[in-house]
Each structure stands twice: as C-alpha cells, then as structure tokens.
Image (cartoon, rainbow, N blue to C red):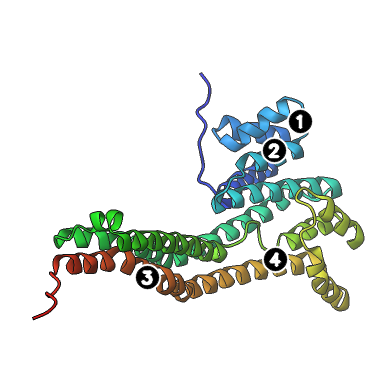
Amino acid sequence: MGVRRRRTGGGPAAVAETVLRLAVLLQAGAAPAAAWRHLAEAGDAAAGAIVERVAGGMPLVEAIEAQSAASAGRTPASARLAAAWLDVAAAWEVSIAVGAPLADSLRGMASALRDAQESADDVQVALAEPAGTARLMGWLPLFGLVIGGALGFDTLVILFTHPAGIGCLVAGLVLLAGARLWTGRLVRSAQPPPGTPGMAAELLAIALAGGVSIERAHDLVDTAPGGPRGADEVDGVLALSRAAGVPAVELLRASAAHDRHDARTSGRTRAARLGSRLLLPLGVCTLPAFLCLGVAPMMLGVLAATPLPALGG
C-alpha cells in the first residue's frame, strides 16, 4: 500500500514548508536525493512529483523547474507558487555550484518564501473589503430590476418590448460590462506581483557564502533558473561592504529582508488606494447602469400607464 500524499496549502508558504524540512534532513546528514525521497514517502505531493521526475532521468534542478511549470496558472496564487519553486531551483543550483552549505541556504530560502507569503496574505486581507464591495455594487443594476418587479412594474416587458426600454437595456448592459472590466483591472493592478522580493540579494548572498568572487556570483545568479532578477539593485550594498570592509553576505540578506518589508508596505498602500479608485467605475458606469436598468423602466411604465390629456375643449 502506497503512502498517502499530503497536499499542502498553495503559495510560497507551502514551498517554504517543504524547503525547511529539506534543510532539517540535510543538516541531519541525509544526502540531497535521499532527503527528497524521505519527503515524498512522508506524503509531500510536490516532493513526490520531483522524485518521480528524477527517477525518470531528469536532473534535480530541472525537476524543480518542472514543478514550477506544473504549478503555473492564471490566478495570482498559482503564479506566486510557480515563482517560489523557480526561486528554489535557482538557490539549489547556485548553492551546489559554489559549494555553499546547502542546508543553510535552504533555511534562508524558506524564511524568504515565508515572508513573501505573509506579505501577500496581508495585501489580500487589505484588498478583501474594497474588492468585495466592488463585487456587491456590480449587482446593483440587477437589484433595480428586482425592485421594479416587486413594486408592480413590468420592467422586463418594458426593457424587451418598448423602443426606449430596449435602448435602456443596451446602454445598461454596456455600462455594466464596462464597470466589471474596469473594476477587475483596478483590483488586478493592486495585486502583489509574482516572485519573492529581494531574491536577487538572497541568491547573491548564497553565492558569496561559497567564497566566489562578486563577478562570478553575479554570473551564477543571472544564469540560474528564472533568469536575471535585477542583481544590479544590490550594487549599493556591495559598495557599502567594500567601503566598510565587512562581509557582504549578511548585508545582502538584510537588504533582502528590507525589500520584503517595502513590498508589504507598498501592497498595503495599493490596497488602501483601491477603495477610492473603485469609486470611478461606480460613478461612471455602475450607477448609470442602475438608472438604465432599474429606474428608467419604472418611469417608462408610469408614463405608459398615465393617460394623455385630451386635445381641444
């Protein structure tokens, strides 16, 4: 009987859990291949998939990259999950290339991924209220139809048979579709981008921990899975390290932690601004759609039911 695989939650936190367990197994003396196999036998679904690829002849780093591709999707959560596995593949490749302690590298990677997930969670919580309000207001024009029917007006009949009602129906649907597209675009723009903030500094710290030169470290980071990650942004940290005569590894990791803090603050700021920006599609599209689909049919019904005054004496 096979071992039942445990499915972890989505996002970088799930990857961080797997990576942290790998680090513990490696520090306990397990070989890398054996550590992955132990995780797979313990029920880790991602580790099981990676072990199956390795058993089929795929190199380990490529197997981790393939896990990133398998995790990719259209949702922000799946994009973050795929980016997290790509970061793990890069850290593994860089650590092996320079001979840095793999367990320590993975512990740092697990911490970075956990911070990234917490940052994304904070932003999602901050976005929940304005996004939920926007979705609720999107139903307002349809509520107008229900209200009209409850008051005794044949709003649907007017919208589909009366010439002016048909015009109101077309205009209302166009405005409603525009409001949904506009609102969705605003909500998507407030989402945190995929990837782990400060990953260039993290990978460069792993490379330098192996004792290679800065130029060699830059080359390894640029050619690691995922491609260049803006390593030029850490030049200021490296310059400070040279000027102060202190090792750059801890400075780089502190810089990466600062980048993650900035990403969390920026995400909260975007979420706070979203509430006011959502007023634009509400005022320009949603409320006019409510007037077209809810109020205008009732007014047309009243006019149709009101007899016109007789002409003449």
Front: mark 2 or 1: 2
Tell whether label 4 touches label 3 (CB within 8 Å).
Answer: no
Q: Secondary structure at mark 4?
A: helix
Kind of element beneath mark 3: helix
Which circle, 3 or 4, is nearer the viewer?
3
Query: Residue furthest toward the left?
Result: 313
Q: Position of residue 137 (x, y in %)?
A: 35, 65
Amino acid on which disc 4 is placed: Ala
1 or 4: tag closer to the N-terminus: 1
Residue that mark 4 sits on = 256
Query: Residue at point 12% right, 69% down?
Result: 307
Q: Is residue 31 visible?
A: no
Task: Work out which quarter of the rendered image holds the C terminus and state it.
Answer: bottom left
Q: Marks 2 and 1: CB-CB under 8 Å?
A: yes
Displayed quadrant of residue 30: top right
Which label is found at residue 288?
3
Query: Label 1 neighbourhood size at 10 Å, few (<14), some (14-19), many (20+)?
Result: some
Instruction: Say which residue appears at 59% left-offset and 51% top-offset.
Output: 12
Which mark lies nearer to you, 3 or 1?
A: 3
Label 1 secondary element: loop
Give percent across and percent down for residue 105.
73, 52
Among numbered discs 4 and 2, the one appearing first in the sequence: 2
- Taking 66 as reference, is 18 left or right? left
Q: Which residue is mark 1?
A: 58
Residue 161 appearing in the image: yes
